[in-house]
Amino acid sequence: MSSTPTTPAALGLAPITPENVDAALALRVRPDQEALVAPVVRSLAEAYAYGDTAWPRLILDDGLPVGFVMAFFDIAFHPDRPGDRPRSGLWRLLIDAERQRGGYGRFAVEQVCAEIRRRGGSRVTVTYHPGPDGPAEFYARLGFRPTGELSGDQAVAELDLPPLD
């Protein structure tokens, strides 16, 4: 079932709380996408381990959970490389299998970009599995450009944010 968001006003992000954690954990991608994105339970464990540098959020449409997004802020991307600049960006994006292709991913990326801009950032980094089944085209449509770098087995892309008015 493909779904279209009702109105932009109906879309939002919410912190993960004791009241909504089960709904977050219930989100699942399609079986053919499972190798492309970690499950929410792993993301929440990483958010706990990384503390304030992680920003996990539930994606809501009119209060109903439709996906999960997690950003990271000011992390040395390659801590083993002296001089590597801290980066901020999109760590995880998961839209529930029943809700894909409804604009939720674009909304979540826009919200992460806005939060990075709010925190003083001017560039957003994302990593993803390269290949024909991966999300490279999705990120390219949003303006991300591949850097040619790899982070583990994932491609790295960046988006420069426009200056604040």
Image (cartoon, rainbow, N blue to C red):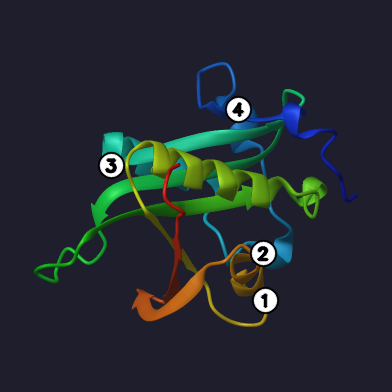
Please tell me whether mark 3 sits on a helix, a strand or a loop: helix
Residue type pointed to by label 1: Asp
Image coords of residue 37 (percent x, y): 55, 59
Q: Image height check: is 77 above or below 165?
A: below
**Which residue is disc 2 drawn over?**
33
Image coords of residue 106 (percent x, y): 66, 51
Residue type pointed to by label 2: Gln
Residue at point 57% right, 51% down?
93
Q: Quadrant of the C terminus?
A: top left
Q: Earlier in the sequence, mark 4 or mark 3?
A: 4
Residue at point 51% right, 27% down?
16
Residue type pointed to by label 4: Asp
Q: CA distance from mark 4 to mark 3?
A: 21 Å
Do residues under tags 1 and 2 come within 8 Å of each other at their CB atoms? yes
**Which residue is disc 4 drawn over?**
22
**Which residue is disc 1 drawn over?**
133
Please tell me whether mark 4 sits on a helix, a strand or a loop: helix
